[in-house]
Amino acid sequence: MRDTRRGAFAEAFAIGKAVGQAMRITLVNMFRKPVTVHYPDTVRPFPNRFRGLLALTYDKETGEENCIGCRLCEFICPPAVIKVEMLKAEKRNYAKTFTLELYACEFCELCVQVCPTDAIIMMKSFDLATADRREMLLDKDRLHAIGLAHDPSWATGNRLRDMQAPPKKTAAEGEKPAVAGPA
Amino acid sequence: MTLPPIVMATIMSAGVLGALVGILAYVTLLERKFAARLQSRIGPYRVGPHGLLQPIADGVKLMLKENLIPASADRPIFNLAPVVFLVPCLLIFATIPFAPGIGVADLNTGVLFFLAVSSLEIVGLFMAGWGSNNKYALLSAMRAVNQIISYDLPFIMAALVPVMLAGSLRMSDIAAAQSGLWFIAYPVLGQLSFFAFIIAGVAAENRVPFDILEAESELVAGFRVEYSGMKFALIQLAEYAHVLGTSFLGALLFLGAWSGPGPIWLGPVWFLLKALAVFIVLTWIRWSFVRIRVDQILRVSWKLMLPATLLLLLATAAVIVWRTPGA
Amino acid sequence: MPDLRAIDYTGSERLTMNMGPQHPSAHGVFRAILTLEGETVVGVDAVIGYLHRCHEKLAETLAYVQYPTIASKTDYVAAMSSELAYVMAAERIAQIEVPRRAQYLRVLVGELQRIASHCLWLGTWCMDMGGALGGGATIFLYCIRERELVLDLFEALVGARLLYGFHQVGGVRYDVPAGWSEECRDTVTRIEARLIEYEAMLDDNPFFTMRTRGVGVIPTALALEVGVSGPLLRGSGVNFDLRRAQPYSSYEEFEFRVPVETAGDCHARYLVRMVEFRESIRIVRQVLDGLPEGPISSRPGVKSLAQVKVPKGEAYARVEGPRGEVGCYLVADGSNKPYRMKWRGASFSNLAILPHILPGCSVADVVAIMGSVDPVFGEVDR
């Protein structure tokens, strides 16, 4: 009888100690700053390489469209969401139509990687939630509009290909530190 | 002009019930914010400033929800169960005096009434599990009957220690007996019985770590699984009322009820604050532990809690006899 | 329909309960038809296939340059190991050598991924055992908070948080940006400090040990017979880790301990994974200290669909993922697409242990065991 009593109290004491330990940890966490980010009032700063919305770009100097309608992005896309029709012209080719089904896109950045003219890039934004899926079927005008509306990510076709193959220079030059400052 | 006692009693009951439902709604918000802070997050924030309108939004939502009754459910039992569950949980507040002289009914056997009526909720719980005609609900209800009966015994024993120390079952007598020293500060016996009260209380209310009956990850809401809309709201209200009632009882038995610095009319405020402190301790326990299996719960109850609280009661009796001169 | 003849119906008062595909603790879409006697499980029929997405057929239609992004979707919680298995198989057939810097980067992301995956395992397991409204949710949120730190690292490295497309045949696609190594060191130091908190909350916790000791014991012989791998195998006393037994991608250059426990119960698997946390952090630090200069791929970056053609041959590449052995068996026919790919998902083989260990335990134990087996149904159903 005595032994059982002592055993029971010893067990109770061990339980109490472990219980107090666990409760101490939760109490410690109570006084830490919450990790909640009040989206959409504040937005997390996006890292430089963020793979967000897709966009088509214009040439910085001439203002012409960069896309030459070569369809490499269409062929490489794993879920086949890009459809391009080429428009031949005298000096260079263009894309007559360029549709991208963003609702099926897997954001793998392969289209950006293969683009020879850095025409298609990804933006530092993902904000395109909509109630109508048809709004996520992006045509050429919308893609250009997205390109003007947000900040572009670091990755373009040439930069990615330069990073992946030798020359022996280390990581891409001219690149800013990994995470941008507060947006 | 003194009103007839029945009118006074009615006004008092209506007042207590109204205040109670209001407090209960905001106690749910308190739990959610407290739990959130323990988890490094914020909790309700957008509905009203800092989430203060969240309980109201929840209440409106639940009232507007569709009232689904499974086709094969036992209708009378299914519909009555939330009421049978709710009524005892609200009735326990009838015996609690919120200040000397203010309370619905300060019975001579107040503590006994409280403990007995709070155990009646098990009937409503089993009705809910049975009436749902659902294997998960039935399993949960069977576990519940097992558990609540097992833990009501240590709960009662632990609650009896302050009763013995005060020498009366009347709640206002117990509160008055703590004017010198709160029972929780009573050497050894006070603390031990408070711990036993808390542990048995957590288990008797089916809160984690003893909430095997509603184990969301196994039984998905247990006996409540088929309820929606206002009936679900009643069940939730009843559960929180029971927890709050236990907190009030704990504050009264161990923390000196309405005694506190300041004028006498501040008493109920202190009482509420102490009850909320007990509630926060129960919540803190809830959000810190994983749950244990039902056979382990029962083992803890019968092999650990019951002998321990019985011994505690015997020890209290011995100490009282030893302390009382000429006994 | 499951084979009901396999269940012995000679008992009385038996209840058939469906832990259906939609269930908070099914860890994905998993259906277990449990036959219960009171609270004890006497038979279990596991039904899988709810997440079947035809990966193996898809691999036949996608080129070697396209598929790695899809491979990450098999074991989506540990995407880096899944991609690695595929590209390693292709590299093995074509005998492509991977530059050392790329190998080190593969180890780095593999171990960071192991940390993130184990964070998710611990969180979801405790949530299953402790309820979505209770202490389990607390540990879940702490673990997710730490996992987010690792995912932030991946986001800075790759641009994506869950499904990366980091590997390519011949090396990797992304190099370490400026300032990333310091961030990585900071992150693993923080996670190491938080690990101490988790262990304080769980190790001696009687509630936790009551639920996990002696529960779901897998005897060593059974583990070897059924073919489980990973922490299940090491928790049952078998000292087998692919990173040690068949080192790939420069793992032989790193010092780390392979944890082995002999009890075989849920608690043993918990201890194994907690040690793996720390060992992964150790490996990450070693990689960061010794990261060599050089190219990150021995093949030029993807420029066109027909770029990578693997000559005729077949190979099986195995990777030690957080859940066990992830394997990819590739049959190549000289074109830019494989002829056949067979995927060995670790969780698929691990789940086979369930009909052997579930009978005899109670319903609450089913949840604890499922959590300690840690299946991800992307690689079960592929």
Image (cartoon, coloured by chain):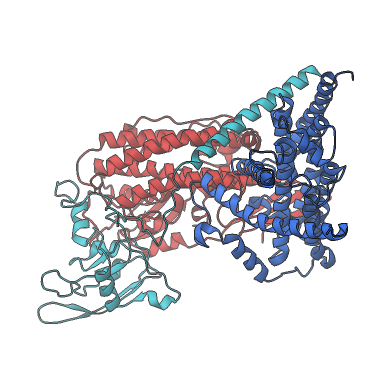
Q: Position of residue C290 (x, y in %)?
A: 26, 34
Residue located at (17% from left, 67% from top): A117
Q: Position of residue B181 (x, y in %)?
A: 71, 29
Q: Is residue A140 left or right of residue B188?
A: left
Pick out the residue farthest to the front.
B1
Residue located at (30% from left, 76% from top): A142
Q: Nearer the viewer, residue A167 or C145?
A: C145
Q: Quadrant of the C terminus of chain B?
A: top right
Asked if B142 appears above or below C254 in the picture, the reply is: below
Q: Quadrant of the N terminus of chain B?
A: bottom right
- Choose top left, top right, bottom left or bottom right for residue B151: top right
Asked if C191 appears above or below C6 in the picture, the reply is: above
Q: Is residue B110 left or right of residue C107?
A: right
Tell which chain the image draws in cyan. A
Q: Is residue C271 left or right of residue C356?
A: left
Q: Nearer the viewer, residue B69 or B111?
A: B111
Q: Judge whether residue B236 can be spotted in this image.
A: no
**Chain C: drawing colour:** red
Q: Position of residue B237 (x, y in %)?
A: 71, 57
Q: Is residue C72 left or right of residue B148?
A: left
**Chain B: drawing colour:** blue
